[in-house]
Every structure is written in C-alpha cells, then in structure tokens.
Amino acid sequence: MSSDTAGSGAASSGAAGAGHRYEVRSRQLRFQGRIFSVVTDQVEMPGGRVGARDYVRHVGAVGVVALDDQGRVVLVRQYRHPLRRVIWELPAGLADVAGEELPAGALRELAEEADLRAARLDLLVDVHTSPGYSDEMIRIFLARELSEVPPGDRHERHDEEAELEVVRVDLDEAVSMVLSGQITNVACVAGVLAAARARDQGWAPLRPVDAPLP
C-alpha cells in the first residue's frame, strides 16, 4: 500500500461538474495489479466538504462487432470466473500493448479470438462499463469485409480462451438475445444494439476509427 499526496500530478487533478470542480486532495493506492488498481481519492465536494471515493483504475479495452456479408454478428462464448459461468461476448480484450493504437488492438483481438481479419473498420460506440466504481472504458469497433486467418497463422489460445466458442448469429437475433437477457455482457449489449441501430440508419452514425476519446 502506498499513498500519493495532493501535490502529485494525478492527485491534484480536478474535473468540472455543474459549477464545481471536484479537486482530488490526496490519493491512496490500495491494490496494484496488471489490469487494474484500486485507489481511494479524497475529493473536495460542493460546499467544501472532502469525501473519500474508492474506485478501480483500469487499463481500458477494445471490442469488435464483426458483421459478415450475410448480416451475422460474430459472438464468442467464454468462461468468466467472477460469474462462474460461460457468457456471450464480443471478440474483445485489454488495451495493454505498449504503443498499440486502439484500432490495431481491435483487429488483433478479432484475429486472436475469432480467427478473422477485417478489411473495413469503423468506430461504433464508446462505453464506460460501470462509472460508479471504475474508470474503465471500452471502445467498440464495427468490422466488415471479413476473411479467415490462415490456419498456420492463427493464435494459440490458452486458459479460459482454450475453450472459447465462436458463433455467428443474425444481428436481429442477437438483438433479441439482448432483450431476452441471454446477452448480459455490457460491451456486447451496447455493441449489438448500436450496430443494429447504425445498420437501420444506413451506417450514417458511424465515426472514424481515430475519433477522439470521450
């Protein structure tokens, strides 16, 4: 456990609210891991009171809604230990490769988890997964013009990914799976619904892959 003081760059930063700037007076590191850390910030509230806020600082992630020429979305079924079960997800992964741009990371995850390449990539939606206790954000891309990764070039999957199942589902059926509660992963829910909406609007809402982060 370590503690940062208000004089450090991270701890002295503030964010503008509705007429108030929420200054961080100090920060205490509770846990540091490869993917996330847990910290406690002492934050100046409206009226001058300072309150403690515990939250998770996350490296961020990318996800891919991959649509084939038949209008099917590529989904994966993967075991998630906190839930103790297999759930439906998008091909996705951490933004933890030094120097790798997010679009490149999305294409890498698509190849590693679904054995697919994409000749066309657009920005679909950005999602803060749980802003009440984490700063994690997932940038979700739309991948089209898909092709198979040659067998000799495919990524060797380990651990939970060794049993990862790749399934193609009609996009409208995937929307029904979201609304019936079969799909609960937040990135998958947001990506599927956003893709269906963007398709119905002739893809007009899509953004360029290098659009600024929120």
Image: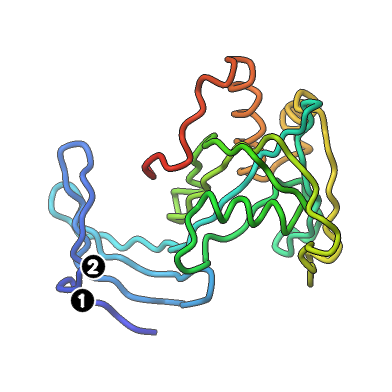
Q: Which amino acid, by three-letter code, is at mark 1?
A: Thr
Q: Report, in whole angstroms, how far the alpha carbon at label 2 lies from the one at label 1.
A: 6 Å
Q: Position of residue 42 (x, y in %)?
A: 26, 65
Q: First in sequence: mark 2 or mark 1? A: 1
Left or right: residue 143 versus residue 73 is left
Q: Is residue 177 above or below residue 166?
A: above
Disc 2 to disc 1: CB gap under 8 Å: yes
Q: Residue at x 40, y 39 (%)?
A: 211
Check the image and name the residue furthest to the top: 201
For residue 205, the mark is none
Q: Is residue 198 above or below residue 93?
A: above
Q: Position of residue 203 (x, y in %)?
A: 57, 21
| Residue under label 2 | 11
Q: Residue at x 35, y 60 (%)?
A: 53
Quarter the N terminus occupies: bottom left
Q: Residue at x 52, y 37 (%)?
A: 123
Q: Residue at x 23, y 70 (%)?
A: 26
Given residues 71 and 69, the one toward you in this image is 69
| Residue under label 1 | 5
Q: Which amino acid, by three-letter code, is at mark 2?
A: Ala
Q: Is residue 122 above or below residue 97?
A: above
Q: Classify mark 2: residues with Cα within 10 Å, few (<14), some (14-19) or many (20+).
A: many
Q: Position of residue 36 (x, y in %)?
A: 50, 68
